[in-house]
Amino acid sequence: RVGPARARRRGGRVSRARALGARPGRPKRAKPRPAAMSFKQQASFKNPMFAGPDSEDDDDAERYDYDERGGRGGQSSGDDRFDDDAPPPRFGLAPPAGGFVEMNAPAPSAPAFPSKGGGGMGGGMGGGADVAEMEGGGEDPAVAHGVVSALYAKYKKNYARRTDYVSLFSFVVFVGFYLAILFMQRQAEEAYSLTSTLKSEMIPEKLELQSGNEVRQWISALVKKSWTDPRCGDGRCEMPFEYPEYGRFGCKADCDLLTVKAKVTPIQVDVYYNFSHPKGSVSPIDLMNDASWNLCPMEVDDVLGGTNKIYHGADCYYEKDQKFDTQVGHQSRVIEDVPDGEWTIVVKKDIFKKVGGAVRVRANVVKEADNKRLLLASHYAQLRRKTELAAYDATLTTLGKSNQTLALEYLEKLYLAENTTIYARNDAGLAGNKTANEAAWALNKTLVNGAYEAAGYCVANSVRLRTAMATGGTYANWYDHSKFTTQCTTPNGASGCVWNERGHIKVLVGGAYVNKNPACTCNAGPPISCQCYSGLTPTGGAAAVSSADAKDIACVETFRWIDQLWVTTLAQLWTDTNNVVTTTKATADAEFASVLLALQTQSPVTHYEINKMVGTNAQDLKTASLNVLKDADVLKEHNADATHAAVIAARSSSTPYWEQLRDIITPRRNSLQNVQKSTPIYPSPVTSAFTFTANAAAVGYVRANYPGYGLTDVLTLSLKEWNPSVLLRQDYAFTQCELPSRLPEVVGACKTPASVTTPTVANPANTAQMQPFLQQTRFQKLCDAVCDCAVATNGAGCAAGSHCVCPVCSVTNQFANVIYPTGYTGRRKLLEHEYVDAGDVGDVAAAPKYDFTAPYRRRLQAATLDSIQTAISTLTTKQTSLDTAITTIQTTQTNANVQANAHHADTALDTLITRGFTDVNNANAALQTTMNTILSKQQLALDKVTESLAIQQRTETLAAKGVAQIEKLALAVEKQTASISAAWAAGAFTSIDQYVQIQENAVVTREVTAKTNSLSNSPCTTQEQFNNFELDNHENVYAKDAFRERYIGLNNRVIAGMLIYTKRKNLVKCDSNRFEKIDDACSEGRDVSSYGVDPVFKLGTPMYKPTYDNKPTVTKVYNCSELNNPSEGISPTYNPPGSTDGNKYPYCKELFNPRDIPYGFRVKSIPGYADGFPYIFDINLSAKEAETWVDYMEYGLMIEDVKTDVVSAQVVVYNAELGYFGNVVVYFEFTDGGKIEVTYGIDTIKVELYETIQDWIRLAMECLLAIGAAHSVYAEIMDFMDSKKTRGSYLAYFQSAWNYVDIVSIFVHVLTIFMWFSYAWAMATAFAPSIHYKIYKNLAASAHITNLKVPNEMDEMASMFLEMKSLVTYFQMYMTLSGINIILMLGRILKLMDFQPRLGVITRTLALATADLAHFFVIFALVFVGYAFIGHVIFGYASEHFSDMTSSINSLFMNLLGDITYFMEDLKNLTGMIFWVGMIYFYTYNIFVFMILFNFLLAIICDAFGEVKANASEAVSVTAEIGPMLRDKWRSVWRPLFYRDHIPEERVRRQLRIWKGEDPDEPEYEEDRRPKERVFTYANGEKELDAAGLKRVLRRCVIETYQNSDKTFNTYLLRPNGVGSSKALATAAEIDQAAAMLMRQVGHRPKRGPDGEGGVGHENEVQTLQRSLERLIKSQQKLVEGQVKVIDGQSKMASRQERLSDLEHKILGVLEKPPGSK
């Protein structure tokens, strides 16, 4: 075949093009010779039948070259031109004497067949032709043609050898290129530097642990090493975890001061306290000493809520809590550098809420006082002016009204006042009196309206009547009623008007009552509906009054009354004007007092600060008091307005007319109407919903009055105020706080008497009458005094007409001890009536309206009050026994206080506890530092327990004191009741009502006192009180999503955190119960139930918090209602209320154990992990918080030795310097044997693959590698296709094992390329882990720290871990396949080396020793595995090295390598009989396996190697072959410059083909690569038969058997049945089949020659015989040549002997005749 030679199927080689993945063009196969051929065709055709055999020695140069004896050369076989193993041609051949034949010259003629003297084309050379004759132009063309053919064959063989070298070295370069890419991809040195760091930092030194405590210690050590806080002074300010200095926190060296780096808010904390407390309860000194406060960041857990933005975490601003040094007082702290965030004032152990205060911005403290003080002063002045303006407006309005309107309004007021008097006096005949008063009001209104009715009688006769009213006139005086003695008893007329004396006009001006119920005759017609006195007979002889006179009298007296009313009204208006300053001041003062009261209630701190300013100089605004400022503002305005002075100076005596009054006040009124003077700052009038919402416009009006203060209507000055009652000195806070839980009996709801129907009690005035209790005033008073409705009404109190009703006041026998004497009638029951608007009197046509604003007040007469006071004085004098009781109580209280002080001073318990701890410390003085740490934590836990017990003891003591006080109070009440009864019996009371009232008041006092005593001994709270506020300057930029830097080693940053994953065993009863009394617990399956405890609620741990260990807190932290999800069918489960077990509502089974303690750990399923319990050390945990999480894991019993199965710790890190990710997983497996086995995995991977210039260079190399792989696939496919052409079948391709190596290698190579690009461009680029995942709700929570955020990112973090693992697995698989590919490529290199005998030593050695090695390894495997099994079953119980079969096999294999650790550590330490068994085992194994079998292996390999080495000993070395090749190639390349005389190789090759008689442009024949036929070797391997020969032998045997057999045997052969039939004689087809079968079973392929060529067996028998004859002839020729040489040597020896004889003769002659003799 032209082109690179194909690799031989056994130890062959591949072409260079194939090695590089390319395949050059292949020439077509030469067609068979036609019947008639030209000389040129004949010259190029070789008949293999006459081809001479090759020389057995390829390195014998004499086969084809000429020596000095001329024309001898070896004869070449017909296949030589396809011989790939021919040595390379000689380079630098000199041209023949006649020069080279021209390329286009005709080829010399040559016979079609070789001459007799030679075999083949080189036969002429073998016939002994003389060289000189040849060079001289011998006439034998066959000789020349043979020489050229031999040269060309040898040249082709050398060319093929050179091609093999090129293929080998090209493939080696290709493999090196591939290895370079793998080296650049793996960067194992960098990866190992990370792996070694992770291993040294994370992997435990001991891989076998004894308890879970060691696992916790390892986790604690790792967390302590990696979870560290930034170091101050390193030059790096790691915000926000390292921050500017403030208070006792921060780092100035790295981050400067907070006041420099950020905007801060100085604040002022004012704490007011009053520890006064009722006697009989806890001592105020104890309350003072116990209480404390501090400024702390607001905690961010479920208990307290909020968001923590404070730099330093949860530590309080003051290192020690602030204490109190007096029982009543005030503390003020100014803090200049408080950072932004959510803060809280924590008040501790203030069980009765004795501490209050406020937090304010320091810059606003003075501003607050000034702003509010100045605004209040302005508000007062504006209010004064507004009130004065209202007075002037009222005066002007009155002056502008008509007489009729004034009269009607006055009548309306009188009517309402009289109604009020009637009800207040509770007059008898109340209904009749009310009706009479209403009728009189209607009659009077009719008279007034009639007097001013247009076109009416009075108006029409007004001139006449006014004249009669003048002095001396008929009606100059009031009409004399005494003239009438006869009364009209029957009304006359349709109107039916009836009036009494109170409705008479004369009564209205102060006249005496004359007629009690005078009647009058009434006419229906106008102008006046009632004509009084008409028809009556006067006394004293006076004439009767006519109807006309009656009309005149009605009009005149109405006019006269209205005129007098006007005079009175005008006089009153003047009086009001003269007193306007006094009245407006009083009105303004009253309203302003309400404003100050609202300020005192809503902002007591501000009220306190304002009252601290007591300056008297109004010009000094900084110190002037509020009273001075407000009066100065009013006075300033008065002095500035002249109209004010005019009003003050005016008097009615000088200006008697209403017009004059109007003119005086109008200018002043107009001046005040200016909104800048009379607009109040705050809402006016003051209502129940009053707030200090300033009028912005009003503030603007008065701002100019106080320049430089910047008064503003919106000023948020107080950040937080709490417990204002302390500052107000109001009722103690303990009487109001937490009443529903402390004293639910007094918590009530507002109810009206009508709404209450039960319970019923007897009416004291009529015991037979049962009434609802709330309809009796005594119960109403009791309920109002005792019950508290602040919760129900949100502090507003009950509305008028309602009472606060609670269980205490609804007890029906509360007044059972009250004595109601005979004759007690009780108070009259007030009648119900409707309310009217007293101010709506302008509408004279409206229906009558009533004012019942105070319908239930009881007014006592002065005499009654005096009698009550006298009775009380008498009672006080006579109650000596009651005073004695009170004195006794006081003495008892004093003794209790003394005892409390003594108890407080008693330190016996403290001494005992201290002594106990001293003994414990002395006993443990020798323990290590770790034990000291444990003791300190235990000490902390004990302190908390002691504190909790002290609080509990204090609570119990207070409860006991409360009971004692109630008992004493009961005794005192009994004595008081007896004293009151004695005073009644002595006649000390003036009335029954007084006696009953005092008894009822005593009952109310008793209940109020009992309530106070009970509450004074019942703490409001035992928990810390948090008063939250926030500072936010809106200018400080905080780091968003900042994450702490956690490192493993120096620069391997932790991603997300460390995942601790626990899997637990499920313990069940063992199947075998034989030893159940010892232990019957066995593991089976997984346990996913919740376990452990939250140590915050576990008494005895350092994390225990007594203030949290209560039902409200624990159920708030662990809120079972959050589990309720009906859409998914999830709901919390509880035990029924009557159950004896725990988990009753609200303690659900999912979150609480049966003791109602919250579980510490709950199962969480995450992707890629078996069900277990994850616990994550988040990277954002500070060092202190991480320590808390370690403690939570320890004291919460996360890792216990009984049920824990596997604990894994996983960390993913990133090394930015190397660009590598690292994944470390450490497994702690709790084995059934009772120990903990530690295993681990460390994986590193790089996903930043194309970042640098080196990476892009590698990408280019990878692309070239992919192209080469594609060409390899193409070349292998073409080889498969060629098998059909060269070997006759496609299946022939699969008959070579090396082709399988090629296929697998190329397949793996292509697969790894696809894997790499999918990894680099898909998987690696998609891997984008976050530095942090939000998993827990609050990392700094004080309880329930494992509370997961909803939703959380735990699944995302687990997916990241799994993605990291999949990347590592994928990359490891890629590298594993690459390693396999490298091994396959090494095999292909060995295959390519096989063409060269010395390079193919390994392959030929292994091939030669294959059979022996197979047999050896069968024996070796049996013996080796047998010894491994023996070691496992005998020593596995005691030796780790034999504990399982894998360890046993590994140990014995290491023994073969010289490692006998198992013997030194285990077998030597055995005792008893097993020791001797171990010794026998060890020595027999080493003798039999190591010394004998192992040396057998070496012997087999050495024998094969020796044989191969002997066959290759005479082969040409690689350097000897490569040198000429390189030299010729060098000269060919540089021929144009340096070697012009060099003949190019291609030209020589072309010329040789021409000399052979071939057309150089025609393709050459391709080698037929069909498989060689099998041969059968016999005669000790000296003879061989092919399939055809075997057939002929079998045929001959059949014939000979038949011919030579006797008749009997023949008859047997010819019998009809069985083999004796005629068919028993084999046919030709059967003989052929038998020959084929026998050849397959016992035949073999022809053996190789020593250089790799096929030996005998390739040809048929004729060719074999011919080759044998040729070899015999060659041997004979060599023998003849040797004989000739011997003859020549003998001739030379004879001549030398002759010369020696001559010399001897000469010597003898000399001796006979010495020199100088004669």
Image (cartoon, helix red, strand yellow):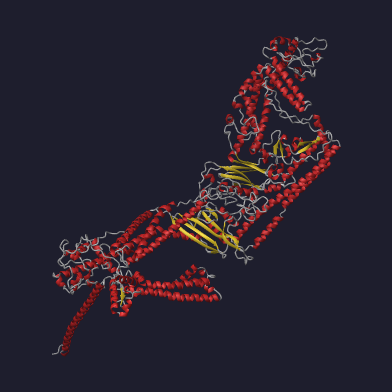
Q: Which residue is pictured at 49% across the width and 53% down the height?
A: 1359
Residue closest to the far right: 986
The picture quadrant where one finds residue 29 is: bottom left
Tell how many labels. Answer: 0
Residue 27 located left or right of residue 1474:
left
Q: Split into 4 quadrants, where in the image is the N terminus? A: bottom left
In the figure, residue 1499 lies in which quadrant? bottom left
Does residue 717 appear to the left or right of 416 in the view shown? left
Q: Position of residue 1697 (x, y in %)?
A: 18, 85
* Image quarter hosting the C terminus: bottom left
Percent across and percent down for residue 860 are: 78, 30
Q: Is residue 1013 visible?
A: yes
Residue 764, how many percent across, how many down? 80, 36
Quadrant position of residue 271: top right
Q: Nearer the viewer, residue 1503 or 276?
A: 1503
Residue 319 drawn at (x, y percent): 61, 50
Q: Is residue 1506 visible?
A: no
Q: Nearer the viewer, residue 1410 or 1638?
A: 1638
